[in-house]
Every structure is written in C-alpha cells, then in structure tokens.
Amino acid sequence: MPPMHEMAIAQSILDIVRDEMAARHCTRLDGIGLECGALSGVEPESLRFCLSALLDGGPWADARLELRIVPLRLRCFGCGTVFGGESGQDALWQPCPQCGEQFGHTVEQGKELRISHLDAS
C-alpha cells in the first residue's frame, strides 16, 4: 500500500494539471514532468506509483510521467565550496570536502517538488 503522504501529493499534482489545462483550453495530456529534490520529503517511487494509480483507467491513462531527482547541493558556510550529491538528509551532516566545516551549510538545491512541464494540447 502506498504512503498516504505521496497519494495526497499525487492528487494535488493532478489537480494543478487539471486547472492548468483548463486555463489553456487543453483536453489531451501527453506527459507530466516533475522535479523531486533529495530533501523534498517525498519518496520518488511512491509518488510515481500513486500518480500511475490515479491516472490508470482515466482520460490521461496514456500520459508519460517524467520524474527527475534533483540532487542535493550545499554551499559551505566557511569557504563557499559547493558540494552535495544524491543522498538526502545524511549529506547535511557531512563536513565540507574543502575546509572540513560541518555546520551552517546553505541548501542551494534539493528541496524542490514541482511540475517542470506539461505536454498537453
């Protein structure tokens, strides 16, 4: 059973898609592009499963889902070095590879959860 958190997010995404398509007078949905950051708090495969379940059997059943994982990117508070990677929360506690500073890093990327594009007509 998928987590309810991702199911609610999937439903919200489809609500946004529906509203955007109506505003642009589109009736056919060919694809949805999503960006999911490593620190977004969303399990990407669960979100994919939930979206597929909600789309299945409906008018948008053939729509492609493109899900891109946005890696974590941090900027060191001490020296300004940019570093990060695919891992989420654990990377927040790793020291800067340049100067060794462990605290105060700024998250520049990785919190995203957004619709990047719609392929609709």
Image (cartoon, rainbow, N blue to C red):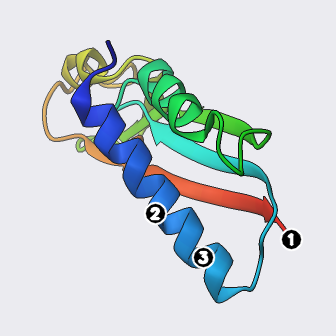
> Within 10 angstroms of label 1, few (less than 14), some, or many (20 or more) residues?
few
Q: Residue at x 40, y 30 (%)?
A: 38
Q: Quadrant of the C terminus?
A: bottom right
Label 3: which residue?
Answer: 20
Residue 80 sits in which quadrant? top left
Q: Earlier in the sequence, mark 1 or mark 3?
A: 3
Toward the left, the furthest residue is 103
Residue type at mark 2: give it. Asp
Label 2: which residue?
Answer: 15
In this view of the protein, can residue 48 be seen by the observer?
yes
Q: Position of residue 61 (x, y in %)?
A: 72, 40
Asked if residue 33 is positioned above or below residue 53 in the image, the reply reads: below
Q: Residue at x 51, y 23 (%)?
A: 49
Marks 1 and 2 close (CB-CB < 8 Å): no
Label 1: which residue?
Answer: 121
For the residue pair 65 and 18, the one nearer the viewer reads as 18
Q: Residue at x 64, y 81 (%)?
A: 22
